[in-house]
């Protein structure tokens, strides 16, 4: 079949690869280059983590919302002037995490996408000839003490019931693994199966190139809509002309919402705006990826330097970046690695802001559209898009090859928002 894939982030390029392997004629549509700075796949924390099954919305979160509104330096910030527009999404968000039963259900659905993500990425990287970009060295969570770890008991319960393997590290083991880590971190948890990518932009671009080698075509354009004959798809329209096709995959991240509406599905989705800073040549820092519990940020060694990634800012897609968010990440790095304070402290060599496409229940939208079975959704992955891209792509390819696993895809169906 002729299949148009809308979006050249990690989900879109993974779909393109799977579909060309299945023998389809694929056109990959995106206004920017695959892996470019416009994409969330470029600027995230680079973690490929089976541990990322913990949803953002958890029981009791509603009590913290006033603090988030007032604390301009916290890990989650809501810009006041956008609050009225955000309220419907926030209400759904709080309800999604209101009970332990609900977050357990979400964690299991996320685990289905994440449990084998390091192996899937290693296989894709090998196929694209960039095996060196995926490293499986484990992912470390650093805490001041065991009490701080136990305060997150529900998060680790969710990881336990979804099969995560981990090792607990005392101060001596932490120091042996990360000599530059501040001495106030005295307890750690190592997710032993976790992996990371050392250059996310180059990796996504390499996957797109591999899809091209398999016969895919890349079209630099913005998708604007669909052409249907009855319920059958005839084309995807773009600002550079139409792309004739029998099927389409909507994997456009946060920009998928309007296109999904044209296909009969109103999906509540907001940008959880994230930031990163890069220290190009730090004298000290982590040897492997670290997440300090007090900073709640990914500290990841990459080919460009030490990437400090995090923050959740709720505003709008169109709002200007607030670069104080990136500066907070840089400043917190000194807390985590005191040696960075030498010479007046670190100065970021690069800063970035991008859009995590987030549904209120923390699950992506994967499945057929209401308007036509020819349009399949693969968007809204929030914090887990990079890690879950390859598994999402296989689900999409299976769905396009036949009836697919309707029961298995039920947690991700757009129809859940109609209830």
Image: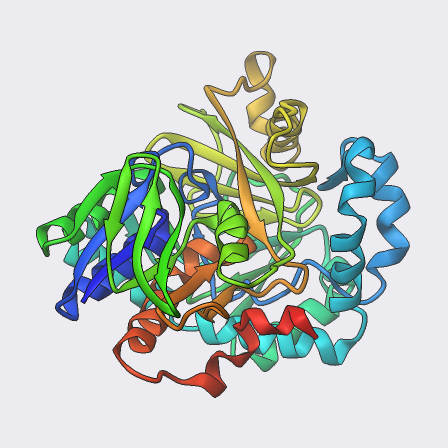
Quarter placement of the C terminus: bottom right
Q: Nearer the viewer, residue 62 or 298?
A: 62
Q: Residue at x 88, y 35 (%)?
A: 70
- Residue 152: image quadrant is bottom right
Q: Is residue 328 above or below residue 234?
A: above
Residue 283 location (% of width, % of height): 45, 25
Q: Is residue 94 visible?
A: yes
Left or right, 311 with reference to 211: right
As drawn, which residue projects farthest toward the top? 343
Q: Is residue 114 visible?
A: no
Coloring basis for residues = rainbow
Residue 122 location (% of width, % of height): 26, 61
Q: Is residue 147 above or below residue 321?
A: below
Q: Is residue 72 above or below residue 289?
A: above
Residue 294 location (% of width, % of height): 71, 45
Q: How many marks?
A: 0
Quarter placement of the N terminus: bottom left
- Residue 317: image quadrant is top right
Q: Nearer the viewer, residue 362 or 153?
A: 362
Residue 141 location (% of width, % of height): 58, 55
- Residue 34: image quadrant is top left
Q: Residue at x 90, y 56 (%)?
A: 63
Q: Residue at x 26, y 78 (%)?
A: 401
């Amino acid at each position: 079949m002729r299949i148009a894939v809308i979006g050249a982030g990690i989900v879109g390029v993974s779909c393109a690869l799977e579909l060309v392997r299945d023998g389809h004629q694929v056109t990959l549509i995106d206004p920017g280059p695959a892996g470019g700075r416009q994409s969330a796949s470029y600027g995230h924390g680079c973690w490929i983590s089976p541990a990322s099954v913990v949803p953002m919305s958890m029981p009791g979160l509603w009590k913290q919302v006033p603090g988030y509104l007032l604390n301009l330096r916290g890990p989650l910030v809501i810009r006041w002037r956008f609050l009225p527009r955000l309220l419907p999404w926030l209400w759904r968000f709080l309800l999604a995490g209101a009970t332990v039963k609900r977050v357990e259900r979400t964690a299991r659905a996320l685990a289905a996408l994440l449990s084998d993500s390091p192996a899937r990425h290693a296989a894709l990287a090998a196929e694209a000839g960039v095996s060196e970009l995926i490293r499986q060295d484990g992912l470390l969570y650093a805490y001041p003490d065991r009490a701080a770890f136990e305060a997150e008991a529900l998060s680790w319960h969710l990881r336990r019931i979804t099969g995560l393997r981990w090792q607990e590290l005392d101060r001596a083991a932490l120091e042996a693994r990360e000599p530059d880590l501040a001495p106030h971190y005295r307890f750690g948890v190592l997710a032993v199966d976790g992996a990371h990518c050392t250059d996310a932009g180059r990796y996504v671009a390499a996957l797109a190139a591999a899809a091209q080698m398999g016969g895919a075509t890349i079209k630099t354009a913005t998708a604007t809509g669909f052409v249907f004959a009855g319920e059958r798809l005839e084309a995807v329209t773009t600002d550079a002309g139409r792309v004739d096709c029998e099927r389409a995959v909507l994997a456009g991240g946060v920009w998928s919402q309007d296109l999904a509406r044209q296909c009969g599905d109103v999906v509540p989705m907001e940008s959880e705006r994230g930031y990163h800073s890069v220290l190009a040549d730090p004298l000290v820092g982590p040897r492997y990826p670290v997440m300090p519990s007090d900073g709640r940020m990914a500290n990841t060694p990459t080919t460009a330097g030490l990437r400090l990634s995090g923050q959740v800012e709720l505003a709008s897609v169109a709002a200007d970046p607030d670069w104080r968010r990136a500066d907070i990440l840089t400043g917190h790095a000194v807390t985590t690695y005191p040696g960075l304070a030498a010479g007046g402290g670190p100065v970021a060599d690069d800063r970035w802001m991008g859009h995590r496409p987030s549904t209120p229940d923390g699950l992506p939208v994967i499945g057929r559209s209401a308007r036509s079975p020819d349009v399949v959704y693969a968007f809204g992955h929030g914090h887990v898009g990079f890690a879950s891209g390859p598994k999402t792509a296989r689900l999409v390819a299976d769905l396009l090859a036949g009836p697919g696993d309707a029961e298995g895809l039920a947690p991700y169906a757009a129809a859940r928002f109609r209830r």
